[in-house]
Amino acid sequence: MILQLKNVGISFDGETILSNINLKVEKKEKIGLIGVNGAGKSTILKIISGNISHEDGEVVVEKGIKVGYLKQDSGLNLENSIKEEMLEVFKDLLNVEKQLRKFEEDMAKPEIYNDPCKLEKLMMLYSKKMDYFNLHGGYEIETKINYVLNGMGFRDFPKDMEISKLSGGQKTKLALAKILLQEPDILLLDEPTNHLDFEALAWLENHIKNYKGAVLVVSHDRYFLDSLVDTIYEIERGSSKRYTGNYSKYVELKDKSEELYEKEYEEQQEKIKKLQTFIDKNIVRATSSKAAKSKRNALNRIERIDKPLKDLKRVNMKFEVNLKSHKDVLGLREATISVGSKDNRIDLIKNLNIKLTRGDKVALIGPNGIGKSTLLKTLIGDNALEKGLLNWGRNVQIGYYDQEHERLTESNTIYEEMRNEFPEIKETEVRRILGNFLFSKEDVFKKNGDLSGGEKARVALSKLMLKKANLLILDEPTNHLDLYSKEILEKALSKYDGTIIFVSHDRYFINKVANRVMLLNENGVRNFQGNYDDFLRKAI
């Protein structure tokens, strides 16, 4: 065991975030940390890495173990070039290389090579430094840097490009590349799959599978967790629980555990109810008050089981169709998808042909920047179709989900947003739907501009549900949702009777929802029947 957390706890502003975290990491173990948003997963990584101090418990790291931590914010030196930042990892080795070059220069000096004593002493130092340099991969620095940068999608980037010129997502990817080059004994990763396209994801999964150290990863990417981890720790109600296996195995074990827990809770509640009833009836009676007091003592000694989370409120979704569409939903022929101003259009995809039939659930995938979201915006009319024909079937009604939530009016309250869009729907029905999405009482009077990403996602999904459209056009619908909400969305869309075309980087979600996959490239599209796993088998 190289790392252990024993009863670790921490509070912020008087609120307990973590209270009973027990966790251990073995050599080469691959562990996933999961839990709802705000459960404290990132906080655990910060405690392990020493970025914040815990208040209770103990963190034990084996002597000599090197811990590497990828923060959600990059922590890069923005003035460095890409290559300069990567070379920072090998600073010690590069200093050794400088010493070797200096030794070589010195050995060429007459006062050294003509003095056997001095030469022998220098050659011994040179030999030791050279052994160290070879042992630690001094001659492989360039190869390692290129391997990782290419894998993380920087193949076409100039290596002398200043980091400040990169986008936020590119900086995050570069920070991940840097920490992978460091090769720590324990690799702490916080949402490492954010901003990665499918090619980079596949590379990262393969790299971590073969990684010689231990990995502790916080991720909402269930496909990633399924591929990599052999242990799951769930953070729930401030405590941790260990499950052996990958994410899918965790779901199976969790369901069984919840059933058992629920049964124990119900049995205890029944016992408490009986005791309380007896006490209430007999506490004032002279003949039975002694027995009632005894029962009350027994009641007070019961260690109460927390209410099962299944009984606590979770998002509730059901997507219905108001009007059935014609069998032929959409036809896009010889289309060119472009972006930019009217006088400066840039073509992203040419010769694009798409046909949607009622009941299709199509996932659009392809490299970042190929134009997946732009294609969706073109379908709904927010982006002009440069060339080609777009034909809609009869009775097609569109419901659109925008990952940026630009269609939410920032100054509106949640309630106003719903009433303005659906004035014909009764107030009680609007409040019921908002309640299904965990907005109740005063929550509905929050302004959209003050909402978190997850809250905005729930508002947008509640609007989509009320629309009862027969064609859903969805742009990254799982972004900002916790694992449980993602699963509820998957089930709702799987049961949906209409047609769906969606963009998603969530491969697990694609597997659960899609019955077709379209791979976009600059010359059009390739069609694959089935889900993401089917696509992988056929595309290779």
Image (cartoon, grey):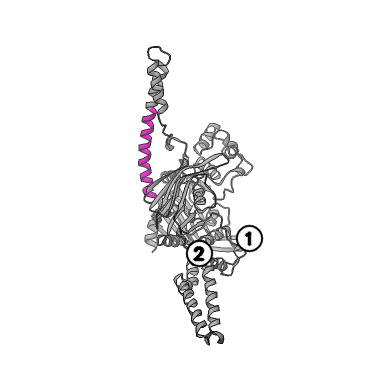
Q: Amino acid at mark 2?
A: Gly
Question: Counting other residues with Cα less than 10 Å from the Cα at mark 1, is it few (<14), some (14-19), or many (20 or more)?
Answer: few
Q: Residue at x 51, y 36 (%)?
A: 433
Decide which of 367, 80 is in the foreground and name it: 80
Residue 477: x and y, percent? Answer: 50, 49
Residue 206: x and y, percent? Answer: 41, 62
Rendered position, 353 above or below 450:
below
State the quadrant of the C terminus. Answer: bottom left
Prevailing secondary structure of the magenta residues: helix
Residue 81: x and y, percent? Answer: 59, 67
Q: Mark 2 or mark 1: name the one nearer the start of the chain.
A: 2
Residue 170 is tagged as none
Decide which of 528, 158 is in the foreground and name it: 158
| Proximity of marks 2 and 1: CB atoms separated by less than 8 Å | no
Q: Which residue is mark 1?
A: 342
Observer able to see residue 222: no
| Residue mark closest to the camera, 2 vs 1 | 2
Q: Residue at x 61, y 43 (%)?
A: 450
Magenta-drawn stretch contains 256: yes
Q: Residue at x 55, y 66 (%)?
A: 88
Q: Is residue 358 left or right of residue 400?
A: left
State the quadrant of the N terminus. Answer: bottom left
Question: Counting other residues with Cα less than 10 Å from the Cα at mark 2, is it few (<14), some (14-19), or many (20 or more)?
Answer: many
Distance in Å between CA atoms under marks 2 and 1: 31 Å
SS at circle 2: loop
Over which residues does the magenta segment extend?
247-269
Q: Which residue is mark 2?
A: 153
Extreme-top residue of the structure: 286
Residue 409: x and y, percent? Answer: 61, 44
Rendered position, 216 above or below 299:
below
Q: Amino acid at mark 1?
A: Lys
